[in-house]
Image (cartoon, rainbow, N blue to C red):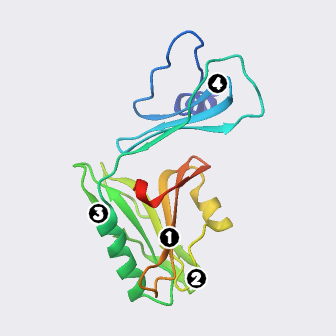
Amino acid sequence: MNNADTILQAKAPVVMVPNHEALAPLERGRRYLAARQGLFVEVARDWLYACVPLGTAVRLPYGILEPVVKIQLPDLRPLFGAFVEYAQSELPKEVAAWIVRDGTGDFRLHPLEARSSSGVHIEYERPKLQGGDELVVDLHSHGRMTAFFSETDDVDDIGQVKIAGVFGEVHRPTPSRVFRLCLHGHFVPVEEGAL
């Protein structure tokens, strides 16, 4: 087999869900699961366990799975508040920041440097994280516009495991906000209370 295919299959294997015993949950990484209801993606990180369906059009002869998403994060509201303050200080321009988990398990807000920014877009440099650091939440503001995920956001979020968040109408006392879990191109809405 081609070397690139061997690496791809090692990084994103496909596992058939057994019919007669439980499938052991993934401890870390990503895999695809062929279940009776269709294809699922399973992703495990220190802060996240998710097993969600990708499609159910095909009935496969394998075991049954129940979708699950467990996000285990500390209270991020202070970091969200700091992000809103940052966004307000830069109005009318959009801003972006990451919430990063470092190797010790602490979380911090990491503002991102914009290549260009206006009231309707932002392009930013993706920083290189230090050894044990991990991107957990990718935030950007929409200035005075409402919070939503654009087609550009959809393209930007493919191929990553993270929570994406948009804060809109940051000039108001209570900005609008929307969150989703990004699982290698599959998006799952996340209620703010789950964070």
User: Mark 1 or 3 closer to N-term?
Assistant: 3
Residue assigned mark 4: 35
Measure the C-alpha gap from mark 2 to mark 1.
11 Å
12 lies left or right of 29: right
Using the image, determine if residue 18 lies above or below residue 9.
Answer: above
Between 170 and 123, the one lying in front of the other is: 170
Measure the C-alpha gap from mark 1 to mark 3.
20 Å
Between 139 and 77, the one lying in front of the other is: 77
Q: Residue furthest top?
A: 20
Residue 100 in view in this figure:
yes
User: Mark 1 or 4 closer to N-term?
Assistant: 4
Residue assigned mark 2: 145
The amino acid sitting under disc 4 is Ala
Measure the C-alpha gap from mark 1 to mark 4.
34 Å
Question: Looking at the rendered structure, which numbered label has been put on residue 108?
Answer: 3
The amino acid sitting under disc 1 is Arg
| Rendering coords of residue 70 (x, y %) | 43, 42
User: Mark 2 or 1 closer to N-term?
Assistant: 2
Task: Please tell me whether mark 3 sits on a helix, a strand or a loop.
Answer: strand
Badge nearest the viewer, 3 or 2: 2
Residue 125 in view in this figure:
no
Residue assigned mark 1: 177
Task: Please tell me whether mark 1 sits on a helix, a strand or a loop.
Answer: strand
